[in-house]
Image: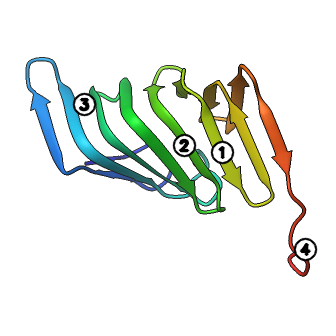
Amino acid sequence: MRHYPKDGPPRVAHASSVTFDRETSQLQADEITAEMPPSPEVGRGGATLSAPSGAGDVHGQRAEAFGKLMVRTGAGDRGETEGAVWDAASDVLSGESPLHVRGPGYSIDGETFRFHMGDQRLELGGGVKAGTRPAPKGTR
């Protein structure tokens, strides 16, 4: 499946199986991988998301990932949570399960999260923990 945003390159999603209900315009999919190339909306060198299953509507108003959601960026960030919901009206990806993110020189954990796509802003709730590690010698 391809999604063509107003600006930037298309986003591509793959799944091992997809079920579509014509009456409700709802999709259900298994073993999902979504590739989002770098664009003004998707920073950090682009991103790849994967989840065991998900559901959404073909009009792109809402989508939900079920099970272990993994996110990898071209900048070396890695995130993991149990499920998330994307709402098109607010352009926010959110979750009520703990989020664990690791990247070059940092780590951050939160009990809940809201990621605002438009301004690439991450809000964490609950027991937030953050840490930094100095860059290895010779990499500055």
Q: How much space separates mark 4 and mark 3, taking CA atoms? A: 45 Å
For label 1, the crowd category at 10 Å Cα-Cα, with few meaning under 14, some 14 to 19 and many 20 or more, is some
- In percent of the image, x 43 and y 40: which residue is there? 68
Q: How much space separates mark 3 and mark 2, taking CA atoms? A: 25 Å
Please say if 110 is above or below 29: above
- Return the mark for residue 60: none
Q: How much space separates mark 2 and mark 4, taking CA atoms? A: 28 Å
Q: Position of residue 70 (x, y in %)?
A: 48, 47
Question: Relative to the observer, which residue lies in front, 106 or 39?
Answer: 106
For label 2, the crowd category at 10 Å Cα-Cα, with few meaning under 14, some 14 to 19 and many 20 or more, is some
Residue topped by disc 3: 58
Q: Earlier along the polypeptide chain: callout 3 or callout 2?
A: 3
Q: How much space separates mark 1 and mark 2, taking CA atoms? A: 7 Å
Residue topped by disc 1: 101
Three-letter residue code for mark 2: Glu
Discs 1/3, front? 1
Three-letter residue code for mark 3: Val
Q: How much space separates mark 1 and mark 4, taking CA atoms? A: 22 Å
Residue topped by disc 2: 80
For label 3, the crowd category at 10 Å Cα-Cα, with few meaning under 14, some 14 to 19 and many 20 or more, is some
- In percent of the image, x 66 and y 45: which residue is there? 101
- In percent of the image, x 49 and y 58: which residue is there? 37
Q: Is residue 36 left or right of residue 65?
A: right
**Which image quarter: residue 138?**
bottom right
Q: Are marks 1 and 2 in contact (CB under 8 Å)?
A: yes
Q: Position of residue 25 (x, y in %)?
A: 17, 24
Residue topped by disc 4: 140
